[in-house]
Amino acid sequence: MIAAVDVKGIKERAIRAALDRGAASVRVAPAAADGESRRRMEAAFSRGDFEAWSYDGAYARLASDPAALLRGARSVVCVAVPYATNGSRSNPPLRGRVSNYAWSGDYHRRLRGLLDAVAREIDEAAGESVTAVACDTRPLAERAFAARAGIGWVGKHTNLIVPEHGSFVFLGEIVTTLELPADEASRKSCGTCARCVEACPTRALRGDYTIDANRCISDLTQRTGAIPRAMRPLIGDWVWGCDLCQLVCPPTIAAGSRASSEWAPRDPDAARPPLVALLRLRSGDYERRYRPTAMGWRGGAVLRRNAAVALGNALDRSAVGALTESLALDPHPMVRGHVAWALGRIGSPPALRALRRQRSLERNGEVLAEIVAALEPFA
Ligand code: B12
Ligand code: SF4
Ligand code: SF4
């Protein structure tokens, strides 16, 4: 019976199970609906900060109330798992850049393993099923509950910063109907620091702990539609995600790379993929190489499109041959359109010849519009 359960002992057992499986911090928040988080989310959604996401008032209500995940929820056990490892931070030519969180196998599976193990401990101790788990994909304001549990504080880059561990941490939660002893929220904040705001190349961060996600490179490289032309030059060499605001963040720098080796890049190309090979990615390679990673949920065309943008920013004429081939042959119009943009950016005589030739052959209206726009400065 739940009334007879030793909640202090269960909390200790849950903490031990999570720490044993790689968590750096495990703390408990009360599961009462979080009005502050709901208000902040509603404000963000009505400002239009998340246009690529189907977020609305109903989502804000659900995500701020753990009872929507588990009826009768009383506590949220929040965990933070560090993932910063040493990968190449140098800048080799014609290589793209992948955000640290996607260097190894997909984190969702591993976090899920950890969360399920902790949930099992709690269920076993309670003698019945009293838990539900969440990581990334379920409607729950994970950063808000982690902050409420005192795991850390939400920084101006909007990521949760864990003292001693920085912000390169994944979050996960075990919601339970047990009333476990709650921990205190953190009183820390960023103070006068604004390094992330200054470092963001797209001005996505406002400095008031909010983000215009429509301008965030992480959002732009993960969306399935076209990337607005004005944003493409700002993306630089990122082909998946972006870490710039975290790489300058003092607590994250101080923490260093302290994740276990299971989060290390799966091979030398994982952090710095060769752009021409990515542009030529075919479905077999995509399934084998990218599907099992955090880069695998949007499909191969998105990765080829991102490679095209990074090649346009690299301004390296040696890529014109590969871009010309993709302009004529890539099966996806979105990819061909971004390739046209890249050739226009490079603007060399062979690049312009390829664009002019394809202008008379291309049948897709959107691709044609990209070709015309790419040629416009040279008319
Ligand atoms: C949508 C989404 C994105 C979008 C939007 C990001 C964003 N800032 O919201 C995009 C694609 C841009 C994105 C990018 C990234 N994401 Co993301 N993303 C999510 C997801 C699925 C939902 C977030 C959401 O609801 N956003 C809407 C905003 C309004 O709500 P919120 O950020 O959750 O919460 C805000 C309010 O609660 C409010 N708040 C509430 N109480 C209080 C109190 C105070 C005092 C303050 C100041 C604020 C505050 O502040 C929060 C931050 O703005 C979450 C998983 C989840 N279910 O939570 C992962 C998640 C937030 N992402 C994560 C990661 C790792 C990333 C990237 C680092 C990946 C990368 N390297 O490219 C980047 C970081 C970019 C950035 N600067 O934020 C981690 C963050 C871990 C951490 N340490 O915080 C999460 C939690 C996934 C996970 N389970 O680990 N992401
Ligand atoms: S992830 Fe990159 S683009 Fe997004 S807010 Fe941070 S620095 Fe800006
Ligand atoms: S860089 Fe400074 S302002 Fe930005 S999140 Fe880190 S501590 Fe806060």
Image (cartoon, grey):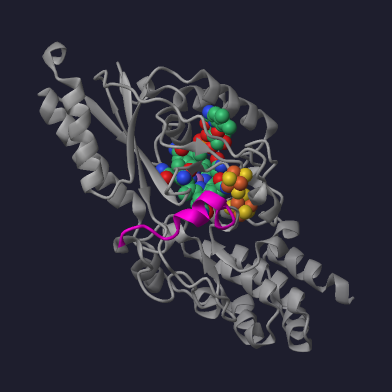
x 45%, y 24%: residue: 62
Q: In the displayed structure, would residue 224 be above or below residue 284?
A: above
x 48%, y 31%: residue: 144
Q: Is 23 on the left-hand or right-hand side of 333?
A: left
Residue 114 appears at what percent x and percent y? 25, 45
x 46%, y 28%: residue: 63
- Name the image quarter holding the C terminus: bottom right
Asked whether 257 falls inside the magenta stretch, the response is yes
Q: For this rendering, which residue is in front, 291 or 243?
A: 243
Residue 305 appears at what percent x and percent y? 58, 66
Q: In the displayed structure, would residue 97 be above or below residue 43?
A: below
Residue 299 appears at what percent x and percent y? 46, 60
Q: Is 40 on the left-hand or right-hand side of 290?
A: right
Q: For this rendering, which residue is in front, 308 or 362?
A: 308
Camera sees residue 249? yes
Camera sees residue 215? no
Q: In the displayed structure, would residue 154 be above or below residue 253?
A: above
The residue furthest right is 379
